[in-house]
Image: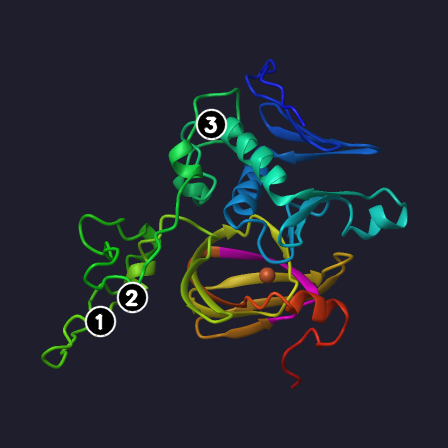
Amino acid sequence: MPQTNASNEYGYRSFSVGGFSFERDEYFAHIKWPGGSHTMPMDAFLRALMRDISWSFFYGIVNFDQVFGTTNHYGNVDVFAGLYNAGYRAQNKHHVENFKTEEVRAVFEAMLDDWTNEGFDPFAAPEETGTPFGPKRGGNRAAITRKRLVANRMTGMKGDIPLRTDAAGNPVNRQFADVSQDEPEVHAEPGFENEVHAFNFFGYVSRSDVTWNPSVCSAVKYSQVCATTEEFILPIIHGNDRVEWFVQLSDEIHWDIQDRESGAPRARVVMKPGDVAAMPADIRHQGYSPKRSMLLVWENNDATLPDLYAKKKLKPNPVDF
Ligand SMILES: [Fe+2]
């Protein structure tokens, strides 16, 4: 689908993929599709769009809000409106189109690039960035094209990426000033100095300059352990397609848990340091972190899981108490 290069009166381009079209003005994203339309505030829209792109459409469903979002089929992606909204479904007003992943990605990346103004970082906490609103004002390509550092062995070991917990690295976040920056002592046997290593993981994570952006810190077969720092609101409502384990490492996150298909409320979960939760495979959830917190997320990357859950060959909850 060709995109228009002409800018509107606010300086922004319009975009489309299939029957969906996207326009922005000073405050809002306006989304239209055959038979309907939807409006989202620009701060929430850009924060959700940033995650959808950088997580490569993530596991399962990325709801930008209660109406618009994407479902990942790993190679192709559904773009939907009202598909997981009981009211839209009851009136048969939902709309969904399927695209090759790369087609949606190209449109979403161009839209994020054009609609992100100078001084606004969609990954940053609201207190730590500028405003996304107003007429078009420059851009922020450095913030929206961050690339994860990929370690070949344990990070910080000789010959691999540096740990950056020194003056050359990110500063400790203002809300993690109480996190110890001591490094462990390592006493390797002679000959093993290049094989044994340890570092202060809390100190490392306290320097993260992004929020709600899991970084894989260990990948063993299907096991992916991701550390992340959270502040303010998870910018998407995530619909799981597998069980997801949370370990609250510091501070507090309040979760709204809803039925994945309808959005009907199911639970409120307040997680405090040391709490562990298994988020079921049939829910959607959104978290609120009043102060910057550390969360460890454990995902099972086995590609056969979504189908096993969909066909009810696996129970949505991993543990019965
Ligand atoms: Fe999730």
Rendered residue at 60%/33% (across/down): 107
Pick the front one: 134 or 223: 223
Spatial CA span between label 2 and label 3 = 37 Å
Which residue position is annotated with label 2?
Answer: 154
Rendered residue at 78%/57% (across/down): 262
Rendered-image quadrant of the N terminus: top right
Q: Classify mark 1: helix, strand or loop.
A: loop
Q: Classify mark 3: helix, strand or loop.
A: loop
x, y percentage for residue 61?
A: 66, 54
Q: Which residues are magenta?
A: 279-289
Q: Earlier in the sequence, mark 2 or mark 3?
A: 3
Q: Amino acid at mark 3?
A: Asn
Tell which quarter ligand 1 is in. bottom right
x, y percentage for residue 117?
A: 47, 27
Rendered residue at 61%/65% (across/down): 303
What is the number of callouts on the image? 3
**In the figure, 218 relative to 27: above or below?**
below
Q: Which residue sits furthest right?
A: 91
Which residue position is annotated with label 1?
Answer: 197
Which residue position is annotated with label 3?
Answer: 117
Does the magenta segment cover residue 284?
yes
Q: Earlier in the sequence, mark 1 or mark 3?
A: 3
Rendered residue at 77%/70% (across/down): 311
Q: Classify mark 2: helix, strand or loop.
A: loop
**In the figure, 217 relative to 277: above or below?**
above
Q: Are marks 2 and 1 in contact (CB under 8 Å)?
A: yes
The nearer-to-camera label among 2 and 3 is: 2
Q: Amino acid at mark 2?
A: Met
